[in-house]
Image: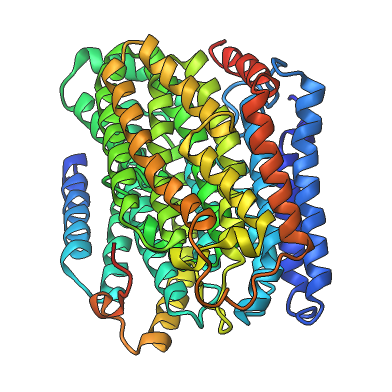
Amino acid sequence: MLELHHVLMVSVAMLGIGTIGMLVRRNAIVMFMSVELVLNAGNLNFIAFSRFLPDPVGQVFSVFVIVIAAAEVAVGLAIVLALYRNRDTVMVDEAARMKW
Amino acid sequence: MPEFEIQVVLPTLVPAAYGLLLLLFTPALRDDRRWLWAVSLGGMALAAFFPAWLLFRAGATGETAGLPGRPMVVMDPLSLWLDLLFAIAGFLALLLVPAYLDRARAHRPEIYPLMLLAVAGMTILVATTNLVMIFLGLEVLSIPLYVMSGLTREREASIEAAFKYFLLGAVAAAFLVYGIALVYAATGHLDLGDVATAAGAVLETGGARAGLLAAGLAMILVAFAFKVGAVPFHFWAPDVYQGAPTPVTAFMAVGTKAAAFGVLLRLLPGTAGAAEALARRWLPVVAALAVATMVGGNLVALVQVRVKRMLAWSSIAHAGYLLLALLAPLAIGARNLLFYLVVYTFMTIGAFAVVSLFQEEEGDDADQLDRFAGLWKRRPLLAIAMGIFMLSLAGIPPMGGFTGKYVIFVTALRTGHPVLAAVMGLAAVVGAAYYLRVITTMFLREPSGELPAGVSVSLAPGLVLAVSAVLTIVLGLAPGLVLGPLGEIASGMIGP
């Protein structure tokens, strides 16, 4: 039987992988994927709590998050594409010119 | 079944409708930029008119409107006042846009609908007590801003700004979702009122649920600290402010900050009001953020050689003062915070308006401090306007910035935060140094080298400068005009 804490462990693992990925990876697309992992960790939490509370509002929220995340992906990939055209790289260390 | 009252959503509906319609027609009317500009200005004026009208009709302490129970959209004096501020900031920023884009050789009319959509997002953000809507509003506000920062994509800095802003904004949004999920887990509610009620009981019993609640609120606080650019979550701000097109920077610096602080006003005191135990936990955290932000922002601003980047660091420092205002008891703290936001709007947009006039032939920003040398001899009026904004940002009487800082300082002193007040005083003194450096450069140094592309002030930016300068002085000389009504709004907020 799937218990609440099983789901939560997966979600915490996703949060951890996502956060570490954002900190250590330097490829813009991979960093972006890591952010999405954290976002979906939150989603998973919502659905799990909604199932076990039980309360339908959490599921509604996760639908909102999915829609917003889709819009964010569209804008984000466009920005990464523009960055690539401008600098010929998506490695953030090479792309960053502004410091301090 | 209560009837749906349309005026509750009017402040959001007007900019959203204008934005979507403009977005529809922009591809067909790419060449009629003046026309698109005029329509977007009209939309922004209407977006300012409706909150002002509703505020006038309801009276400053008028009852809140909305559906009974726990509505997802509320209309109260706080939200209306902030809606008005967003629309004014958007209007002033729009006035700067065509002159800047013409010089930058970036003819991108998409900026007009995006600006309206960002304003719509801000109005969603402040007109709710529901965490779902807060997330929704934050994203509707942020996504157009990501695009707008990268709009002049021929400039290397612009696309880098868009990318950094997007990546860190997405991180903040992801943390916000996770934080809301934890709060939802601990309390079973998403409305701030219900959360506050449940939080008291949860904290009393302690255990895993209390931990979840604390972790969730911490993550939400981190997300908003990102958005207001509080140290140590500020590192995106200087790059983004420097890289983004200057009118967008002006709008972003003012609008995002006002919107995020509007949410914090509901979030922190609202939650703490019902649960003293919670207040004891978040007060030291906000105090630490405020100190780090005031000191860090002012110190790093000292060593900047580009005026735009210096203003970015100064805007971080100002977020610190606003955080300090948040620590005071709600009735007085909210008044001080809102007053400071009003003054900040005009002096910051004015300062960025001056910077937006400094451009190279190729459209790059020519905002090095040296370019301002001897401005007084070449463009006296422009130098006087910039001088007014600098004095106000530095907090020197009789400018509005002084009054704003003064009320926050005195309140902090009287409500048991003398150390924080002292830090604020010292930080402001350090900060005055770099603002005064701009003034001495403009007035005392001899003009050297070329004035970039013959800085000229056309009608629209001139209007922005005049309005901002006059209001900055008026707010300093007669602060009662605004402080009075704001005081009534703030005392209305403690009610049920």
Q: Is residue B41 above or below residue B491?
A: below
- Horizontal placement of B42 versus B397: left or right? right
Image quarter of the N terminus of chain B: top right
Instruction: Tally the marks.
Output: 0
Figure coloring: rainbow
Name the residue located 47 percent from the left edge and 45 percent from the top edge: B135
> Looking at the image, which is closer to me, B108 or B415?
B415
Q: Is residue B333 above or below residue B253?
A: above
- Horizontal placement of B465 versus A55: left or right? right
Name the residue located 39 percent from the left edge and 73 percent from the top edge: B160
Residue B21, given in percent of the width and then of the height, sits at: 77, 64
Q: Is residue B317 visible?
A: no
- Horizontal placement of B284 versus B369: left or right? left
Residue B3, given in percent of the width and then of the height, sits at: 78, 28
Residue A55, given in percent of the width and then of the height, sits at: 41, 34
Q: Is residue B215 visible?
A: yes
Q: Quadrant of residue A36?
A: bottom left
> Looking at the image, which is closer to me, B21 or B161?
B161
Name the residue located 31 percent from the left edge and 79 percent from the top edge: A95
Q: Is residue A77 above or below residue B492?
A: below
Image quarter of the C terminus of chain B: top right
Residue B106, given in percent of the width and then of the height, sits at: 62, 80
Name the residue located 48 percent from the left edge and 23 percent from the top edge: B406
Q: Quadrant of residue B294?
A: top left
> Looking at the image, which is closer to me, B373 or B263?
B373
> Looking at the image, which is closer to me, B291 or B184?
B291
